[in-house]
Image (cartoon, grey):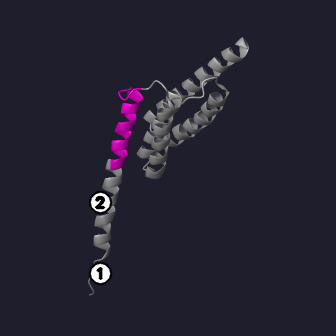
């Protein structure tokens, strides 16, 4: 009934606040704490989503997953960053009224470019490292 709806709204607001706290932690460079908080918020938001009347994708969950991807990227966890970004894009795809120009989608595309750029830099570094390792040390 009405009480259930109010409770759901309060819980949703609380998780949005906790998401914001995670963003502050990330800005302070406390990435591990931020990502842990984001993961907890994601579990709670998924639970709230299951109880909601509207079972479509939730843009707030997509945004949270983008923030998780950004945190993982800053921690150089490229695989986790990629997984979170892929999950964000799936969430956005399930959203009914989200346009291509949506700010969350624009942010996801920026993160995608940063992940790709970081992957390219990492592979280039690894290629250069393997060339160096092929050199045998001079004997005296």
Q: Is residue 39 left or right of residue 7?
A: left
Query: Quadrant of the image for the C terminus?
Result: bottom left
Task: Return the residue at label 1.
Answer: 136
Q: Which residue is depicted at the point 45% across and 46% down? A: 81
Majority secondary structure of the magenta segment?
A: helix
User: Pointer 1: residues within 10 angstroms few (<14), some, or many (20+)?
Assistant: few
Magenta segment: 99-116
- Which numbered disc covers residue 105? none
Instruction: Judge whether 20 appears above or below 3 on screen.
Output: below
Task: Return the residue at label 2.
Answer: 124
Marks 2 and 1 close (CB-CB < 8 Å): no
> Going by the picture, which residue comes out furthest to the bottom?
140
> Going by the picture, which residue comes out furthest to the front?
96
Coordinates of residue 111 in the picture (x, y in percent): 38, 40
Instruction: Judge whether 132 appears above or below 43 on screen.
Output: below
Coordinates of residue 30 in the picture (x, y in percent): 49, 39
Coordinates of residue 120 in the picture (x, y in percent): 31, 54
Local secondary structure at mark 2: helix
């Amino acid at each position: 009934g009405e009480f259930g709806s109010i409770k759901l709204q309060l819980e949703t607001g609380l998780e949005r606040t906790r998401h914001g706290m995670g963003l502050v932690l990330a800005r302070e460079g406390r990435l591990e704490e931020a990502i842990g908080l984001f993961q907890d918020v994601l579990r709670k938001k998924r639970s709230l989503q299951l109880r909601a009347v509207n079972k479509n994708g939730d843009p707030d969950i997509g945004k949270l997953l983008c923030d998780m991807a950004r945190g993982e990227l800053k921690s150089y966890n490229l695989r986790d960053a990629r997984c979170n970004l892929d999950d964000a894009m799936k969430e956005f795809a399930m959203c009914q009224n989200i346009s291509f120009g949506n700010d969350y989608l624009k942010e996801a595309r920026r993160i995608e470019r940063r992940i790709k750029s970081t992957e390219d830099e990492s592979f280039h570094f690894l290629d250069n490292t393997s060339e160096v390792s092929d050199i045998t040390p001079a004997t005296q």
